[in-house]
Image (cartoon, helix red, strand yellow):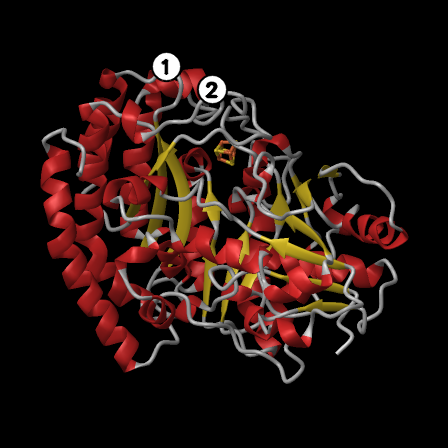
Amino acid sequence: MSGKRIVLTSDSTMMSSYHGGVLLGFAATMPRAVMPDSIFKWLFCPPLPAGPDGSALLAPCGMRKVEASLLEAGFSRDEVMVAHPDHLHQAIGPETEVVGITHDDPMGKIAVREIEEMIGRGPPHNRTRFLELVNHPLIREHRPVVVVGGNGAWELKDEDVGVDHVFLGEGEADFPSLCRKISRGQDLPRVICGSMVPGEDIPVNRGPTIAGIVEIGRGCWRGCTFCSPTMRTLRHRPLSRILEDARTNLEAGQKDVLLHSEDVFTYGSPGKVPDREKVLELFLAVKALGPRTIDVSHLSLATVYQNQSLLREVSRAVGVGSDQKYMSAWVGIETGSCRILARHMPNKAKPEGTEKWPEMVRDCYALFSEESWLPVASLVLGLPGETAEDVVKTTELVESLKEHTGLMLPLFFTPMSETRLGGIRGFSRERALPEHWELVGTCLEYNLMHLKRLHSLYRERMTAGWSVQMALTGVNLLADRVLNKYLKRMKRGEPPN
Ligand code: SF4
């Protein structure tokens, strides 16, 4: 087997269907020692279907974009392959020049890093799997050039783990020419920055995506100091190209559509004031394609707060509560402290002032509950300058949201190299105040309180059979018991172990 010239792939924590419930992918942040690999794989990260040629029949959206850009740049279908990680023997051979890996969190530095510190039982699945992939026997044997891109590529800038190039930023404009340079044997810097692609040039996918993700735009204007999408100018894709991507997914058998941008309600506008007509046109056009459900990846709470009737109209257009039980959206609460908001996220509440933030969050949550929207919220712990008083305000805000179903993800502040806080030391267990543990405990309590309902709602999208569903119910019950031990300690302001 000579191998494909360019192989695009990732490890099994990124290349999974997650049984149709993308949140299960968070389990990849769990320490590997918590459960045997086979059970972890069966329950949380089942492998994607593979084609007879070893290709992955579904892929992360970013990988599909890079694949499309290579084909548009003149590489042939025979030279480029989106390969299934369990079938690399059908993809990598002596003629493979480049292995391009897409990853969101290769070293386990971003997502829920406190789980590793909390449970204290060794490295997480995502890091372990990624390191296994870059050390794959076929990569060692044939020595293709390994390039890692995607949201988590920055984690590898200072890591010596067998990665030849770290590709930061957007891949479509520059990855094809990078492959040609590699092919010519040109000397290249280890870290390469891809340039921004105009919205209308973001390519149309050539194959379906995991979770039915359809990208509608990129970038964010709000400028939070710790965030990387903010470093990218806001732009949106034409509706016709969005619909082509949605069609590609549905024709391949995907049933659900997840519209992705940093703030879906700003679709078609310069960002500050939504274009209601364009937003509704987008949802109605996607709905007309006949998906089982539509979800959105990210929404700004400030946009929702200012445009509550728009959310209601989108609910009607999608049929939330009738055609689908609920609609999920990722939102960023980040903090309950107006002082921290003003310091690190001065535009987060705009056009309102930062002092109104907790009230805005509460109003949005009441609206989400009324309209059957399910918010998955992030909180950032340990931003520079955060005091015990700031943390208490965040805990009070979380407490005040308890009656509303959702998921609360408290994330340790991690400086991403591309951001304005890139050079600052990250937050860790050693620096945690008792108030931080109390906040993590409160979030855990919130999540455990809603876990059963979340699971029953998520079933609508899940492809898992009864045995996995039963096992997941068991895991819920077990989580309740096991985590309660940690929860009680943390709510007293003590570290979990
Ligand atoms: S609002 Fe969200 S996406 Fe935009 S800069 Fe802030 S954290 Fe990033």
* Viewer-side label of 1, 2: 1
Q: Position of residue 202 (x, y in %)?
A: 73, 52
Residue occupied by mark 1: 385
Q: Please name whichever residue, 414 or 339, is drawn nearer the observer in this view of the structure.
A: 414
Q: Within the image, what quadrant is residue 196 found in?
A: top right
**Is 215 located above or below residue 426 in the figure?**
below
Q: Position of residue 65 (x, y in %)?
A: 69, 57
Residue type pointed to by label 1: Gly
130 sits left or right of 43 in the view: right
Q: Indicate which disc, 1 or 2, sits on the residue closer to the N terminus.
A: 2
Q: Secondary structure at mark 1?
A: loop
Residue at x 57% of width, y 46% of height: 161
Residue at x 77% of width, y 50% of height: 175
Categorize mark 1 by other alpha carbons within 10 Å: few (<14), some (14-19), many (20+): few
Checking the image for residue 346, the label placed there is: 2
Q: Position of residue 228 (x, y in %)?
A: 56, 34
Q: How many marks?
A: 2
